[in-house]
Amino acid sequence: MSNATIRRVIILGAIAILGILVVQTYWVIRAWDLQEKEFNEKVQIALLSVAKDLEKLGSPLPPKNLISQISSNYYAVNINDVINTNLLEYYLSKELELVGLSEDFEYGIYDCSSNKMVYGNYISFDREENVALEKRKDLPTYDEYLYYFGVRFPNRNTAIINSMALPIVFSVILLFTVAFFIYT
């Protein structure tokens, strides 16, 4: 084979590998979006169930705007009544496990008289882990609701990355392969 033919084969091979890399990157991004959407839907279902459980105990629920996603990992649930802290923690843990979410979370209950999140706790689903108090952060307030509780998932992105470990590993291997062929 002549040098020109070998170069063409190498160039076409590099273009093919780069095409595979582009497609794989697209699918990793798409998988990330789907994992985020699935996580958000599970959280919405669990929080709606918690609100319905509280309603059964006499807390009236608003007809709309029950759950608001404040940020990618923080949700506020509008309850038109004082919230029992022990029941809230129990229902949150139970409902999140029922939908298949075993992510650590923290919750806080808004006190309309002091305009602050007054009660909250960090819940770890890792039974062996002893969670220190410094892990807790103050949850932000949400001005649109009078009585509500907020739930934050501090390790949300880590959980999504862990669930996508295999495609990410293959993408990195492919990237190193392309870099090797470009270098040689």
Image: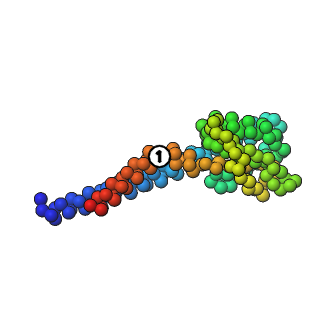
Q: Nearer the viewer, residue 69 or 184?
A: 184
Taking the spot 56% from the left edge, 46% from the top edge, the residue there is 159
Q: Name the amino acid, label 1.
A: Ala
Colour convention of the picture:
rainbow
Q: Is residue 127 left or right of residue 31?
A: right
**Quadrant holding the C terminus:** bottom left
Q: Is residue 128 left or right of residue 143?
A: left
Residue 119 in sight from this viewpoint: yes
The answer to whether any part of residue 75 appears in the image is no
The one nearer the camera, 148 or 66, is 148
Residue at point 42%, 48% (across, down): 169
Quarter the N terminus occupies? bottom left
In the image shown, does 144 or 161 lie closer to the viewer? 161
Furthest residue toward left:
1
Residue 104 in the image: state x and y as whole percent: 64, 43
Q: Write down the residue under mark 1.
A: 165
**Element type where label 1 sits in the image:** helix
What residue sits 30% from the left and 56% below the top? 16
Residue 103 in which image quadrant: top right
